[in-house]
Image (spheres, rainbow, N blue to C red):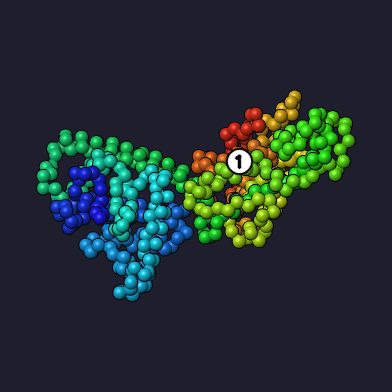
Amino acid sequence: MSSELKQSDHTTDSLPSGTKGHPEPSRSSHSEPDHAAVNHELELIVASPFFHASKRSQQFLKYVVQYRLGGNEEPLKERTIGTMLYNRPADYATGDDSVVRVQASEVRRRLEQYYQEPPTDSLVRIELPLGSYAPEFRWVLPHRLLEDQSTLRRAHAIKTGAILEQNSSFVPLNRKRSAWVIGLGCALLVAGILTGSWIYQKRASKLILTQFWSPIFTSSKPLLICLPKTVLYRPSIALYERSAKTTGEFDNEVDRMNGRPHLNPDDMVHWGDMIEYHDFGLGKGDVEAAFRLSGLLAKLGKDTELRIGSDYGWDDLRNAPAVVIGAFSNPWTMKITSGLHFTFAEHQPGLFRIQEQGPAGRAWFPQFDPRTAILTSDYGLVTRLVNSSTGQFVVCVAGITAPGSEAAAEVAAKQEYLQEALRNAPSDWPRKNVQIVVKATVIDAVAGPPEIVAVYVW
């Protein structure tokens, strides 16, 4: 299978010397920039979350790309790769040992995940076609833009007086025309700088999301998504039957699950009339948060396991990275975040808040409409601990009430909110712990777009 650098169907000046089926072009000044673009893309790929935790995939991709760029005319063979990368004997039976085929399949899968959201500043796309071990390089930018970049390089050379006689058809310009070309070169240079800056900023914003979650790939174990389950009681069947207004009104579970006993405020209810139900107790905000974060983690290529209530404990949290959801309903969140800069606290019985440590520490309380007592705003907290008290990477996502949990999960799952929160963070924040306090305006019990109100990095 051909493995040429593909700009367009009619472009041949970037093909390697001696490519079968194509005329052999002369060496041009484009060869080095082409190699630089491929090597730059290779660096981005192996540093991405999809390859970061797999040294074998990194090793395989680097080998086949460098083999291709090295100008080796002999096609990449399975036995060659097995011998060079996996210490197999030179005459080993490839039919019995599938190590190369399995690794190639794994690299293709990871490349597919990586290119689901292609980096905006990539000039070339690296592919590993099915049935081949020779990578293909496909230009992402259109041919016209690549020509413009060549013009920009020439204009810069004119400006600095560094013209080389690389093209025999080049004729020196007179001063007037030379000044015009220099002006055009400067304009193109400025445009290139501005475009590069914009691409860099856009790429950086996408990197923030992957940098925030990158520690999950230091462990090969699935990440745990830990939901709390509160104690929940329901009226007993006997209480339903006693309160029924018509014969057979609550005779089936469907009616009991979707109806309330007919009780007046002053009716007597005994403790025996209330039955604990172990299959119930998940909070709406917690479920929303888990759903949002599990979708993100699947997109990042990380396997997850859902744990609910008593299905997980301290030993589980010590053995795998985790996302712990919920605040006052989840004792593990309270334990993990205890003593941190921002914590959850109970101001008075039934009055909850997020509290900043220190004598002048701020506090955030949910707000209610004074006339209707309906919740109008809530607060949530995202806590990212690179090395928590569990010894593992942990992200705690929780709100004072359900809308706060939803808002916190949205911040942890979307690059634009993380970019806003970490705009002024130190450059080495990916190696540090982070806490983000968020506010959510609540309308009809639904959280609006989150607002970043406080950030702490240490």
Local packing at callout 1 (Cα closer than 10 Å; few below 14, some 14-19, many 20+) is some
Residue situated in front as seen by the camera: 288 or 11: 288
Query: Which quadrant would the N terminus be assigned to in this image?
Result: bottom left
Residue 275 visible in the displayed image? yes
- The residue under label 1 is 288
Q: Is residue 374 left or right of residue 296?
A: right
- Rendering coords of residue 43 (x, y %): 38, 55
All told, the count of numbered labels is 1
Above or below, 388 against 95 in this view is above
- Rendering coords of residue 233 (x, y %): 77, 43
Residue occupying the point 38% across, 58% down: 105
The amino acid beneath tag 1 is Glu
Above or below, 273 against 67 in this view is above
Residue situated in front as seen by the camera: 66 or 322: 322
Above or below, 202 against 70 in this view is above
Q: Is residue 1 left or right of residue 253?
A: left
Q: Is residue 68 left or right of residue 339?
A: left
- Rendering coords of residue 336 (x, y %): 67, 53
| Element carrying mark 1 | helix
Residue situated in front as seen by the camera: 209 or 359: 209
Residue occupying the point 37% across, 45% down: 121
- Rendering coords of residue 303 (x, y %): 52, 54
Residue occupying the point 19% across, 48% down: 12
> In terms of image quadrants, where is residue 192?
top left
Residue situated in front as seen by the camera: 447 or 198: 447
> In terms of image quadrants, where is residue 252?
top right
Residue occupying the point 80% across, 31% down: 247
